[in-house]
Image (tube, grey):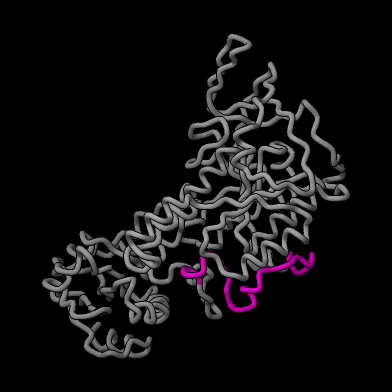
Amino acid sequence: MAFAVTSSSSSTAISGSSFPRSSASPDLKVPQIGAVRLADRHATVSLSRRRCAVKPVNAEPKRNDSIVPLAATIAAPEISEKVEVEDFEQLAKELDNASPLEIMDKALEKFGNDIAIAFSGAEDVALIEYAKLTGRPFRVFSLDTGRLNPETYRFFNEVEKHYGIRMEYMFPDAVEVQALVRSKGLFSFYEDGHQECCRVRKVRPLRRALKGLRAWITGQRKDQSPGTRSEVPVVQVDPVFEGLDGGIGSLVKWNPVANVDGKDIWNFLRAMNVPANTLHSQGYVSIGCEPCTRPVLPGQHEREGRWWWEDAKAKECGLHKGNLKQDSAAQLNGNGNGASHANGTAKTGIENLARLENRKEPWLVVLYAPWCRFCQEMEESYVELAEKLAGSGVKVAKFRADGEQKEYAKTELQLGSFPTILFFPKHSSKPIKYASEKRDVDSLMAFINALR
C-alpha cells in the first residue's frame, strides 16, 4: 500500500454545510483507545474507548517523509480535561445507510492528521476521490511489496500527479525478504501457500504503518468475497492491529464503501473521470502482486483471480483477517453438513467421509496439490461443476493431498497423480475413482450421473 498528504483547492458542501481548508480547531474531538499515563497531571486514564482533543498537523500538497518517521517524531497529544466514550458499534449502525462520501467526511473530521487511506493500486482509488470531494486534508499510504505489476507502479505515479499528492510507501524488511527467498526461493507460495510471503511483504509493513496512526481507511466491500467479507461494517475498532497509543483497541478502521457494489464503484470512477490501473482493461479485477494475480473470465468472481491455486476460503492475505467471516459449516464432516458448493476439507473430514457406510448425500472429492498445473487448469471446471450441482444433493469438496497427507491419500484414497477425482456413493463406503483424463464439466457430470 503507500501514505500521502493532500489538501484540495476548494471545499465541498456536504449536508448543507462547508468545511474549512485550514487546520482543524483545537477543540476537534479525536477518539483514542488504550491506557495513557498523564505524568504532568498526576492522573491515569484507563478506558477501552476514549476521546481526546488533538491539534492535527497542517497538511501540505507535497511531502517526502514516510509514516514511520512521522510516527516516531509526533509530539504527545494535548489531552483535554473532558473524556468521552465513543461507541463505534453504535456509530456503525448510524452510518450503515450513509453514502461513502458522508462516511469519508466523518472519518476525516474525527481523526484529522491521525488517519490515512490504505491504497492498493486498484479500484480503491475511489477512496482518494471521495476524500478529495470532502475538501478536507487527507493522507494516503501504500504497501510496495517489491512484486507488483509494472502497470501498478505507473498507476501510483499517475494518481500522485492527478491529485497533487505524495503517497507514503511502506516496504518489507530487506533482511526478512532475503531470508525467505534464500531459504525457499522466489515462488515458494505456489507450493506451501501464500501466507508466509504475505506476512513478510504485506502484513508486517502494514503493522508498522498503522503504529503511526489512530485510524485507517480501507476499500473493503462486502461483495468482494462473500465467503469472508460479508459482515464488514462501515466503521469499527480494529480487532487485530494496534494504533499510535498501543494495544489492541487503539486503532479505528473505516470501510466507507463496505455496502457499495463493485459495479457502482466503477460507475462512480467513470462519472468522475478518475484514472484507473490499465490492468483492469486486460481482465484483472482484484489486483495484488504480479505472481499471485491473474485476469478473470466474464462471470467469474473477482477473487478467482487471486491465489487461484488455493481454496476459496484461503484467499485473504492477512491485512483484513479481523473481518473474516468464520463459517464452521464449511468444514466437511462427511455426513451432509458441508456446504453445497465447493469446499476445502481437512484430513479429519475426509477420514470421516471414507468411514461412513450410509451417507445422507453422495460426494465428489478432488484430491489436489496447489502447485500442480493440471489442478490449476481444472479449477474453472471444478467451480462450475460445484455451481451446477448446487441443490442437487451431490456435495463437492477438495482435499489437499500433497505434503504430509500424500502417504495417507496414496494408501487410503487411491491417489496416483494430481488431480485424482473420487465419487463417494450414497450407500457405499468405497469411493469410485474417475479414470478419464477429461476434466471438463460435461465429462464430470456424465460420470456423476452414471453413479448417483
Does 217 sit above or below residue 151?
Answer: above
Q: The N terminus lies in which quarter of the figure?
A: bottom right
276 left or right of 180 in image: right
**Could you tell me which residue is drawn at 29 percent across and 72 percent down?**
369
Q: Is residue 394 above or below residue 172?
A: below
* Count of marks placed on residues: 0
Most foreground residue, 257 or 192 = 192
For residue 304: magenta? Answer: no
Residue drawn at point x = 68 percent, y = 18 percent:
82
Side (left or right) of 289 relative to 426:
right
Magenta range: 268-293
Q: Is 372 in front, or is 188?
A: 188
Identify the residue shown where x is 21% and y is 75%.
424
Would you place residue 414 above or below residue 91 in this image? below
Q: Is residue 159 visible?
A: yes
Task: State left or right for residue 349 relative to residue 229.
Answer: left
Q: Where is the C terminus found, in terms of image quarters?
A: bottom left
